[in-house]
Image (cartoon, rainbow, N blue to C red):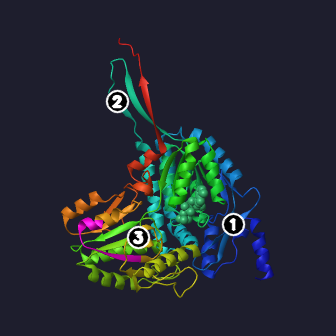
Amino acid sequence: MSMMLRMALRSCHLSPFMRLCRMSTEASKVSSRLSSLGLLRTQGLIGGKWSDAHDRKTLKVENPATGELIADIPFMGRKETTDAISAAYNAFHSWSKLTGSERSKILRKWYDLLISHKEDLGQLITLEQGKPLQEANGEVGYGAAFIEFYAEEAKRIYGDIIPPTSADRRLFVLKQPVGVVGAITPWNFPFAMITRKVGPALACGCTVVVKPSELTPLTALAAAELGLQAGIPPGVLNVVMGNAPEIGDTLLASSQVRKITFTGSTAVGKKLMAGAASTVKKVSLELGGNAPVIVFDDAELDVAVKGAIAAKFRNSGQTCVCANRILVQEGIYDQFANAFAKGVEQLQVGNGFAEGVAQGPLINQAAVEKVESHIHDALSKGANVIVGGKRHSLGLTFYEPTVIGNVNTEMKISREEVFGPVAPLFRFRTEQEAIEIANNTNAGLAAYLYTTNISRLWRVSEALEYGIVSANEGLFSTEVAPFGGFKESGLGREGSKYGVDEYLEMKYLCLGNLKSA
Ligand code: ADP
């Protein structure tokens, strides 16, 4: 490393602009454009002010496709989180008093700004997360739609009137915002996992402290900047990042935080749920899945192949609804395996900015090691590689799109999410057997099935112990439908009219002793 570069790296704490360190031409073009637009924010947001960590400690954000440093961000902890909670608590008073229509207008403006910067945000996602640019732009459209939807729902937070049990009483149900929300989000959707939480929270009148993943905080910060431009008042939306367990513990310990909403691993979700007990907070969790794709003999082969590829390889297999087990009925197994393998072989791997790339890098080395350990375990127990099966020649964290056959329920891959581009094919005989294998897991987020038999479609959909069943379709996510899981996949739902319930308290109001004239 040159002396100049070392000095530049050391001086990263001096100013936000100086935090933009060495990058490839492509990445630096993207970041200088974002910087000129004021969208390359490298500080936390507390009470409407862009802030450093109190001790100026920083953390590196790297491009997973190149290993290059993109920016240094503040390494925040208890002190900054406490400040952010206070800011959110103070802002709650006035934000919650606005009318639904007033909040709606601000959210709608935020949505318009997000959409007008769709490509900028998409580039930022590709830069820090690695997914192909087209997919990243898709995430911005999808994520922004939650802000639009909840801008509309802000005007439709209805209460209720209950017929009274005596003539001198009137009974009402009022819906009120829960208060300050702590929202902890993962790296696989650096934008959409935030808008799915912040949209309904703000619509209901809550204020929020967001903790994005330290691996991908820049998109969250850019979205927050656009939120400020839209007129979200200081303190209503705060963003802190750094020491994740310390930030989490501070949110959990605070009696001012009334709700924790989390998307991430099951292990961390369980910790947060336990930690929320001491102050009895409302909790919603969107945790790991173990999605089965069931392909019946009567499926339309092309539809099943296309759907299974989309459900498996999107975001390099790094989503909680990615196909984790592909169960194929014996009559169609060979045909499906051949067509599926052909499709997978055509997936182009590379830097997400390059034209035609369908699969970017994995997020980090730990992710690649997890994929390797699952494949090693499966091969040692009798599975065989049909396509791929090793690190990609591009190096770093690129991994070949992989298909393995002869997988069975003894293998680790049938019990745990692989969270990478590996499609394991299982063979089954009967419908009942497929349902049993599909349900034999602690997870219950999304399941997919392919059949042209409408009676079977209903029967199997109803038997699957999953929060989401997608029939003859590989991509189902939309802001208008409820997303969430059964069993250990979580609590609560995001999206749709049901999404606001997570951010509302229900108050029963009894008016008694009313006098008759
Ligand atoms: P993943 O394996 O997908 O990164 P994690 O559950 O580790 O999933 O991370 C999801 C989010 O949870 C990230 O923002 C991460 O920083 C945060 N996180 C990790 N550990 C904790 C913790 N102990 N308390 C609070 N948040 C945490």
Location of mark 1 (residue) = 59
352, above or below 495, in the image: below
**Do the residues bearing badges 2 and 3 touch, measured as CB atoms within 8 Å?**
no
Location of mark 3 (residue) = 414
Q: Which residues are magenta?
A: 423-434
Asked whether, in this view, residue 119 is left or right of residue 295, the answer is: right
Q: Tell whether circle 1 marks a residue whose Cβ is less than 8 angstroms from ligand 1.
A: no
The answer to which quarter of the image holds residue 154 is: top left
**Do the residues bearing badges 3 and 1 touch, measured as CB atoms within 8 Å?**
no
* Viewer-closest of 337 and 517: 337
Marked residue nearer the N-terminal end (2 or 3): 2
Label 3 residue SS: helix
The answer to which quarter of the image holds residue 425 is: bottom left
Quadrant of the drawing holding the C terminus: top left
Q: Quadrant of ligand 1?
A: bottom right
Marked residue nearer the N-terminal end (3 or 1): 1
Which three-letter amino acid code belongs to the residue tagged 2? Ile
Disc 3 to disc 1, C-alpha distance: 36 Å
Residue 16 is situated, as x and y percent measured from the top left of the image, at: 71, 65
Label 2 residue SS: strand
Label 1 residue SS: strand
Which three-letter amino acid code belongs to the residue tagged 1? Leu
Q: Tell whether circle 2 marks a residue whose Cβ is less than 8 angstroms from ligand 1.
A: no
> Which dot, 3 or 1, sits closer to the camera?
3
Asked whether, in this view, residue 263 is left or right of residue 77, the answer is: left
Residue 245 is situated, as x and y percent measured from the top left of the image, at: 63, 57
Q: Which mark is residue 162?
A: 2
Q: Say if the magenta span includes residue 488.
A: no
